Image (cartoon, rainbow, N blue to C red):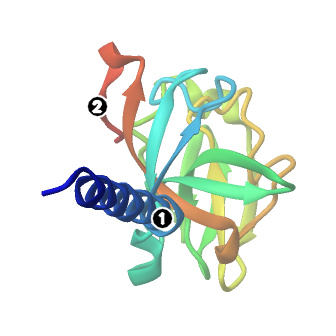
Amino acid sequence: MTIRENLISWIKAILIAAILAIILNTFVFSSSVVEGISMEPALSDGNRIIFNKFIYIISEPERGDVVIIQKENKNYVKRVIALPGETIEMKNHKLYIDNEEHPTSYVDRHADILTGSFGPLLVPNNQYFVMGDNRAVSKDSRNGLGFIKRVNIIGRSELIIYPIKKFSKIK
C-alpha cells in the first residue's frame, strides 16, 4: 500500500468513526453533569452521568426512572413518581398513588417527613409528576417545574461515570 492509499484509508476510518460518534451522541447516548443536591443520595452535585436517549423512542417512562428533563433551556435530573392519569397525594408523611401507599426506598428515610402534604393531584394525559430524591431542596413537580410533558423527557439516566470511584448503574 502506498503512503497516499494508507492516508486515504485512515481518513475514511476517522470520518466513519466521527459520523458514528455523532449519531450515537444525537440519538442513543449522551452525558450530563448533575448540578445541585436535589437527587441525593442517588446522585451528587458534580456527578457525570450517561443517559439513554433511545429508550423512550421505543417505550414510555416508568415510575422510579431517573430521567433527564429539558425545560426552560436547562436539563434537570428527577425521578418519575406518578404516570399520566394517576392521582398523587402526600399525606401523613406517606406517598399515595391512586389511593395506594407507595414506599420510597430510594430516598432518605426522613424525606417523606420533609416533603410536606400536597394533593390529591390528577396527572394530565401525556404528562408526568417528578420529584428529586432530596425532597427538602428539590425543584420539581411540586414547586416550580409543574407536570412534565412527555416531549420534555429526553432520556433515562443509566450510569454514573465520574467520579470514577462512584462508577455504577443508577437505581
Horizontal side of 96 relative to 122 (left or right) equals left
Alpha carbon separation for disc pair 2 and 1: 18 Å
Q: Do the residues under discs 2 and 1 have CB atoms within 8 angstroms?
A: no
Residue furthest to the top in view is 165
Q: Would residue 133 be seen by someone viewing this image from the given angle? A: yes
On screen, 70 above or below 152? above
Q: Give the SS element for disc 1.
A: loop
Residue drawn at x 44%, y 65% as measured from the top left = 19
On screen, 60 above or below 75? below
Q: Nearer the viewer, residue 136 or 75?
A: 75
Horizontal side of 158 relative to 40 (left or right) equals left
- Specify which label sits upstream in the sequence, 2 or 1: 1
* Residue picked out by circle 2: 168
Q: Residues within 10 Å of mark 1 (few under 14, many from 20)?
A: many
Q: Nearer the viewer, residue 74 or 22?
A: 22
Q: Which mark is residue 64?
A: none
Give percent across and percent down for residue 144: 87, 49
Dot 1 amino acid type:
Lys
Dot 2 amino acid type:
Ser
Q: Give the SS element for disc 2.
A: strand
On screen, 74 above or below 126? above
Residue drawn at x 81%, y 59% as measured from the top left = 146
Q: Quadrant of the N terminus?
A: bottom left
* Residue picked out by circle 1: 53
